[in-house]
């Protein structure tokens, strides 16, 4: 059995993969020149401009202690947020009427076009997250929404929390 890359449907690159293959982006070299939402700092690690990514955007988000973002959505993009440190409170809906919280190790999924707001639920600790989106472009549409005063709490319901978890 041959180990020629061409046998696997890939043209042999004659060393081009050395620079066009796997890329490591050091954490201290992220790009803050990306779509921003008031109240948070986004920094791009993986996007088209930096590594040629066609279908992904990945980076970090920091929300300062006791801060929150404005309401926004990300157009047709899907987003996944992984909480590294701190406590995230998400609000979403036409009037930000729903809320749920997530802590370190939790993943948050935000579907396309859903109006949402990220809130740092801690008054003293920064909220640090890793963010991935389903396209190489950075889309953030800031919205002017009058939020409801008392959002409805929505428990996470999944196989490990069939009654819902906070």
Image: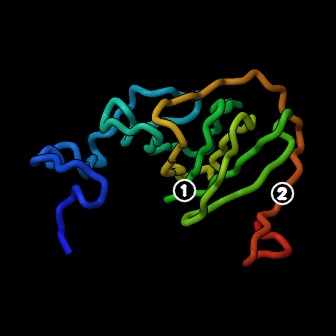
Q: Quadrant of the C terminus?
A: bottom right
Residue shown at 22% from the left, 48% from the top: 11
Residue shown at 25% from the left, 60% from the top: 7
How far is the residue under mark 2 from the one under mark 1? 19 Å
- Does dot 1 land on a helix, a strand or a loop? strand
- Does dot 2 land on a helix, a strand or a loop? loop
Is residue 160 shown left or right of residue 44?
right
Residue 41 location in percent, x, y? 48, 35
Is residue 2 shown left or right of residue 122?
left
Name the mark on residue 125.
none
Badge 2 or badge 1: first in the primary sequence: 1
Q: Residues within 10 Å of mark 1 (few under 14, many from 20)?
A: many
Residue 157 location in percent, x, y? 79, 67
Q: Quadrant of the N terminus?
A: bottom left
Q: List the residue tagged with mark 1.
A: 82
Q: Relative to 141, is 65 above or below?
A: below
Name the one closer to the observer, 42 or 132.
132
Residue 31 location in percent, x, y? 35, 33
Residue farthest to the bottom?
A: 160
Residue farthest to the left?
A: 14
Name the one closer to the observer, 87 or 32.
32
Name the one closer to the observer, 105 or 45.
45
- Looking at the picture, the colour scheme in use is rainbow
Residue farthest to the top?
A: 144
Residue shown at 51% from the left, 47% from the top: 131
Residue 102 location in percent, x, y? 66, 59
Q: Residues within 10 Å of mark 2 (few under 14, many from 20)?
A: some
The reply to whether callout 2 and callout 1 are in contact (CB within 8 Å) is: no
Q: List the residue tagged with mark 2.
A: 154
């Amino acid at each position: 059995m041959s180990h020629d890359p061409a046998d696997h449907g890939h043209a042999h690159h004659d060393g081009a993969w050395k620079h066009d293959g796997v890329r490591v982006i050091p954490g201290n070299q992220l790009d803050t020149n990306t779509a921003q939402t008031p109240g948070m700092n986004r920094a791009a690690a993986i996007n088209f401009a930096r590594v040629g990514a066609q279908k992904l955007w990945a980076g970090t988000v920091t929300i300062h202690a006791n801060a929150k973002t404005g309401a926004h959505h990300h157009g047709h993009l899907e987003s996944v947020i992984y909480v590294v440190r701190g406590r995230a409170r998400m609000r979403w809906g036409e009037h930000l009427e729903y809320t749920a919280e997530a802590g370190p190790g939790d993943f948050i999924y935000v579907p396309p076009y859903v109006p949402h707001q990220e809130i740092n639920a801690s008054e003293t600790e920064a909220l640090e997250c890793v963010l991935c989106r389903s396209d190489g472009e950075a889309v953030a549409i800031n919205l002017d929404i009058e939020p409801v005063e008392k959002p409805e709490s929505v428990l996470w319901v999944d196989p490990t929390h069939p009654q819902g978890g906070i």
